[in-house]
Structure formats: structure tokens, C-alpha cells
Image: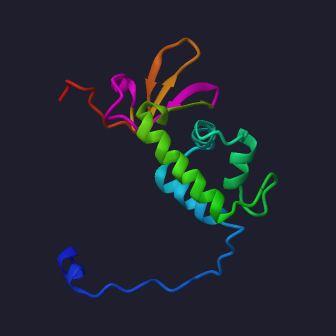
Amino acid sequence: MHAADLSRQPYRRPPMSRATDPQRMNWLWRLVCEVADIRPAEVVEALHVTHVPIDLGRARSWVAGDDEEGFLSLSIAELERNLRALVLLREDNPESRGVVVIEHGQLALESTMLDTDPGAAGMVNGLLRISEDGAEEAGEDADFAAPGEV
């Protein structure tokens, strides 16, 4: 079916596939984090900006599965606070969307701000790897031209 055909059909709400407990919204938080590419370290940074005391372990516990070690439930109020803090952080400081992580023994910078970061030339699909010798390496699935290269 073509998009034009779908635009003419009436919208239908999907059926409720689960009961929701406002004190256990981790499943929704995991989905939001996956879609928006939100990492626990970014959540910690955002909450610290809004003067909420939190450590990385707590932020990681919210994306853990219900049956995983370290799981702590997330309420709908916490989910909303997290999202509002992330919005505030991103509005006030677009460069803060980069998070330094260690991946497979390499230092990596994750960022969703390729358009506004002047150093984005070395970033590919949001990931710039810096090997132990300090050389920058692009991601394997890179289809990317640095600014000024077409």
C-alpha cells in the first residue's frame, strides 16, 4: 500500500497489549532510550544539571531487564523527570550529547550532534573511535563524507 493511500484511511489506535504499572515503567524507558539513542551516562549528566543526585549504577538499572541483576524499577514520574532533564540539557548545551565510553578496549565518543559539532569530520554514524595509539578510526559501516568533501 502506498503512503498516499494510507493517509486517506482513518487512524486506528493499536490495542493495549499490556497492563501498565506507573511504578514500573522501565519497559517504556528502554524503548525511549533505544529510539533516541540515550545512554545512561547522558541521563546522569542531564540529571546532575538539574541537581538530581544520581550515579551511573542507578541509571543503568533502569535499562536492565526485570529479571536481570541490578534492576531497579522506574516510575512514570522518574521517566518524565529524566526526559525533561534531557530536553533541558540538549537545549542549553547541544555539545553535551557526546558521551565518552570504553568499547572493546578503545575509547569512543558517542554523539548525536554531528550537524552542530565542528569536530564532526572524524565522526561516523555518531561514533569516533580513538585507538590506544591515539589514531582516529571511523566506524565499520561508514558511508560518510567530511564537511567540505562531496
Residue 81 x/y as whole percent: 59, 54
**The N terminus sits in image quarter:** bottom left
Residue at image x 48%, y 44%?
A: 88
Residue at image x 71%, y 67%?
A: 24
User: With 16 as the anchor, is 114 left or right in this view?
Assistant: left
Residue at image x 48%, y 32%?
A: 96
Quadrant in the rendering for residue 13: bottom left
- Residue furthest front as drawn: 51
Numbered circles on residues, count: 0
Q: Which residues are magenta?
A: 104-123
Residue 49 x/y as whole percent: 58, 36
- Residue furthest right as drawn: 69
Q: Is residue 105 magenta?
A: yes
Residue 123, compared with residue 59, is above or below; it is: above
Q: Is residue 93 magenta?
A: no
- Prevailing secondary structure class for the magenta stretch in the rendered image: loop
